Image (cartoon, rainbow, N blue to C red):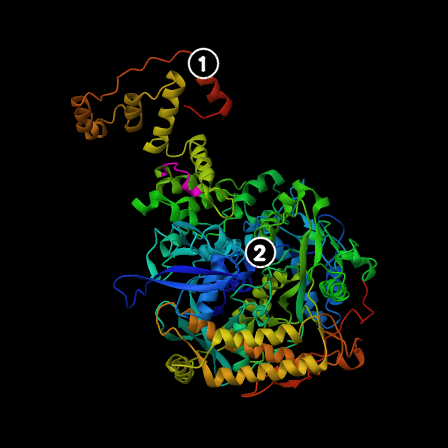
Amino acid sequence: MVVIGGGLAGMRAAVEAAEGGADVAIISKMHPVRSHSGAAQGGINAALGNREEDSTTAHTFDTVKGSDYLADQDAAAAMCDDAPKQIIWLEHRGCIFSRLPDGRIAQRPFGGAGTPRTCYSADVTGLVILHTLWEQLERFGVKVYEEYFCTALAVDDGVGSGVVAYNMRNGDLELVTAKATIFATGGAGRMYLKTTNGYASTADGMGIAYKAGIPLMDMEFMQFHPTTLKENGVLMTEGARGEGAHLLNALGERFMFNYAPNKGELASRDVVSRAEWTEILAGRGIDGCVLLDMRHLGREKILERLPQIRELALDATGKDAIEEPIPILPGAHYTMGGIETDKWGATRVPGVYAAGECANVSVHGANRLGGNSLLETIVFGARSATHALDYIKKIGDVKPSEKTLANERDRVGALLARTGGTRAPALRRAMNETMSANTFIFRDDAGLAKAVDDVTLVRKQFDEDAYVMDKSKTFNTDLVGAMETDFLIDASLALAAGARARTESRGAQARTDYPERDDANWLKHTLAWRQPAGPPRLDYSRAVTITEFDPQVRTY
Amino acid sequence: MAKITLDIFRFDEATDAVPHRDAVVVDVPETTTVLDALETAKAEIDGSISFRRSCRSAICGSCSMNINGITGLACKTPCNTVMDEKGVVVVDPMPNFQPMKDLVVHMDPFWDKYSRLKPYLQPADADSTHERERRVSPEDMKKLVDVANCIMCATCYALCPVVSVDPAFAGPAAIAYAYRFIEDVRDGQRKERIAQISEDYLWLCAHCYACSYCPKHVDPHDRIIDVKRASIKDRVLMNERGPRHALVVSKTIKQTGMLAETEVIQGTIGRFNVRGLLKVAPLGLRMAAKGKMPPPFVKPIPKVDEVRTIFEALEVPVS
């Protein structure tokens, strides 16, 4: 079994596979502890009920409501039901969670949640879980092919048979045989100019699966996090508001209660981001921002529970959150869309799985709740490996065709052989600009049509003219960056095309020309199938699975 | 906007016998981080400039490098805090590592130091005896949270002069990680872990404080002291020279207010370790010939009680 990506989902899958007796390896373009999962700050949801009475049903309901009823409810229930067990699993393996005075795991309130359900470790929750899982890799001796960049999926006789990976240390392309392949490559925030995501969040797994004929689902739903720094897009955790921080406009008003009379700052992220942007557009912002005010929490609480974001804000803005409010604005954060899977992480191609942010299970639907992304990585990392363990016992040997390797050698060879043209950073910039201008919080047909056209043009330019300047075989990040840009272009085009076709407003997609949610026509998923040129073919054959919770009007 | 010159170490291990330097000028706001300046240089001027980076928010630990001769995270270092009056910033790969390409180094020896720790919780009791989480007090957890902020960026390892002379030394980061398990009340291998890190040359640390410069305020140097104390408190490998040396130094100072060098040598090597003492005998003879032989006995200084009071206040363990 091979797992592509060494973040939380990938490592959780690999540990489950190793404990289940599989010969498993991780292929990752970075050392696992460098993964962007480590930047997750606020926490991970589970109905432990350590502070207030809670239930997995309540968690499922909050998740479904948060999704604006686009989540598949069986998948959301599977995640929320498994959550307490997975948190205990992590704790038993040493995860350093913050504690209540009686020694149980501490939980904090988060947006869109009915009870304090978010387990955390100060504001470095992703980092401590990342380390716990890396420790388990060490424990089980899981082989990590570190600084190998996966470039293609091999599908032979209709089943996944392995991958091609580029060894960044020496420039070799290698064919890897695997009965089961699990993609766990994270998100695609780098489609946008400003994002909380690190440089590595470049839609790799999405792009690879998409090229291999697996559809991407609901790509139009991109989460814009309400509290990011204007200077560099860096995240200020929702945990700040969970601990009681306020959002203020230029008039000093806590404006959120005008938009979410009950929950205020702790409404779901789509609601808060839209409210902020509305305030800014109405002229009640300050230099294009609103303010995140933590002062009343006091020095001690900020230093105990939010030390990382205090320092990040200080470094980027020179402002100390203990003494003054921090200017923030919404920024691209989380890719709800991704590789279409079932509730076991299995794609339409047997032997190929996806877990974590690169996958769309779908548990987040049109809007993810804070604290559910880390949970998804853990639950579906484990579940995809469980399914794959069963699958690899049933099938015989697989042999990936040498043709896949030859194709990749040709493709990479052609990129390196070109002696002039447009460099990938310039192409990426063009894509970023149109995505940020036309597919941001408020969307309309004209803007989305422009985004589709612009990115289609970038696609064409990339295919005909992309130029890699560095010809070295050693650690060629110019080449890897170009291949990442290739994947981002595909993801962007799927996003823009899906957003344009969906003529309604739901969750993170707000159409000014179609401001209402349209359950009669749109309780269905968008499946995007890659076309060799131009925008994807869209298909709506997959309806939303509704089990317990009928769609209701959504207010916070 | 300011014109900033990046003076960059260039090297490709596959093709270059020796490194060279390139000066690349970028037009960026002077508050731009060194990482963003490098990113601009790569995107706009020379695509072959190579460095590791990911999160650009000081949490992934990828971009540690030497900036004007001092190791630190490029994403946490604004250009205007390091450039000279001509706007030059000098960037080199981390020392104590083999360069691979430009600012990218071979990290494997650093990861190996962690692997040797068996860096995973080995609980004292079976998981199955706990239906829920193991209870840990907030105070006990706080000790670990402070160390958990370590992002394994290797800044401390690159700054460590002991690593530079003895690559077998575990280094500050791994010792801090060992502390994370040693102080975890859930773990059942405290003594074994202390023994392991002692064997990985814990006691070679010279307490130069170079590793106190930590971008995440983990302060590995203080953790090294904590682990040494734990070693003495739990009486692990007490016959090794490291703990013997620490104890005899403390003892002579507490007794006399002075460092009684003769006793320190005997105490460190062992009064009855004839072979060990013979090994240092030539040094002793040379010192005697130059009139540098310390006196065999040291008389306590006046008011030695005050020194003893300091020891008691600090609760320094003395056997």
Q: Position of residue A474 (x, y in %)?
A: 35, 68
Q: Which residue is mark 1?
A: B305
Can see residue A19?
Answer: no
Q: Residue at x 41, y 73 (%)?
A: A166
Q: Circle 2 sits in a helix, a strand or a loop, which is it?
A: helix
Tell me where residue A148 sits by quadrant: bottom left
Give amino acid for label 1: Asp
Q: Nearer the viewer, mark 2 or mark 1?
A: 1
Q: Which residue is mark 2?
A: A126
The residue furthest top is: B302
Relative depth, front residue between B73 and A400: B73
Q: Position of residue B279 (x, y in %)?
A: 20, 31
Can see residue A544?
Answer: yes
Q: Is residue B210 part of the magenta span, yes or no?
A: yes
> What range is drawn magenta here?
B205-211
Please determine whether, in this image, residue A377 is positioned above or below residue B270. below
Prevailing secondary structure of the magenta residues: loop
Q: Residues within 10 Å of mark 1 (few under 14, many from 20)?
A: some
Give amino acid for label 2: Gly
